[in-house]
Every structure is written in structure tokens, then in C-alpha cells.
Amino acid sequence: MKLLKSEQEQFIFHLGKREKQLLLAVLDLYPLVPSAHQPLSKTGASGEGETNQHLLDESLAEQRRDNKRQLQGLLNDERRFHDTDTGCRMALTAPEIEWLLQVLNDVRVGSWILLGSPETDVWPFELNERTAPRAWAMEMAGYFQMNLLEALHHGGVT
């Protein structure tokens, strides 16, 4: 993924053919953070706390549904991707990049949680049929986040 140009809040990226497939595969995983991962309180919920937790869960579920609809709209927008001989060009605005960073972060953090929330920088687990897809998703989401953040930084938007 390479930033080709940025002008007037418009960022144009080049994605290789395989990169586009990888990006779409990562985004297809959204949402990954389990809803129960967002407790309102670390202490046991009771009475009003349970009601408030339920309201938080409903609000988060609605936000995820809205994000999923918005994501599908972004990916289905024919003006967004233009095929080239070597891949495609992808056009995003700065606010779309910021939003896409949040979606990618959900996939990255959700994968990390599903891997058991390892606390070290080295792989504390064996890669196998269960862990490899989650490790792949976590790393690929991070790859795309890094490229988008770099584009915002070098494009003059910080």
C-alpha cells in the first residue's frame, strides 16, 4: 500500500492486486472485539449497574451495525477503487481514513483478545489452525493501520 498523492483532504493510494484482497479480507472480519469486552464497571453489576451495562451493550451493538453498513457502502462505492494493470487505486478522505483506522483497530484488538491478550512482543503461543488466522488478522490490520497513519502524517494531516 503506497500513498500516491494527497490534495485537499483526498488521499490516493496504490494497492497491489494481492494487497486489495488482503485489505478486503481483514475488513470482512469486522467486528471482532467481543461485546462483553466493554464492561461498564470492573466490579459486579447489580440493579442500576446491570441496566446501564445493558444500555452500553445495546449502544455498542448499534454502533457496530452502523459501522458495518458504512463499511459495506465504502467498499461497494465504485468511485472508491479504480483498477490498474498492477492493482488498484483507492481514494479516501481524511475523515474516512480516521474511521477506517477505528475499524482496523477493532479487528486488530479483537484478534489480540481472541489470542488470549498476550502481554509480550514475542509470540507466546504456538501457531496452529486455531491461532494462525487470528495472528494473521492482527498483523495485517496493523500493517494497514501503519500505512494509513503514515499517509495522514506525510499528507500534512496530523
Image (cartoon, grey):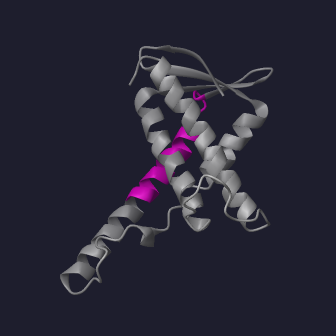
The front one of 72 and 10 is 10
Residue at image x 43%, y 36%? Answer: 98
Q: Would residue 106 be found to the left or right of residue 58 on screen?
A: right
Quadrant position of the N terminus in the picture: top right
The front one of 4 and 44 is 44
The image shows residue 27, relative to residue 97, as above or below, that is below
Magenta highlight: main SS? helix
Q: Residue furthest bottom?
A: 47
Residue 76 visible? The answer is: no
Quadrant position of the C terminus in the picture: top left
The front one of 54 and 152 is 152
Residue 79 visible? The answer is: yes
For residue 69: magenta?
A: yes
Residue at image x 28%, y 79%? Answer: 43
Q: What segment is highlighted magenta in the picture? A: 63-80
Residue at image x 19%, y 81%? Answer: 48
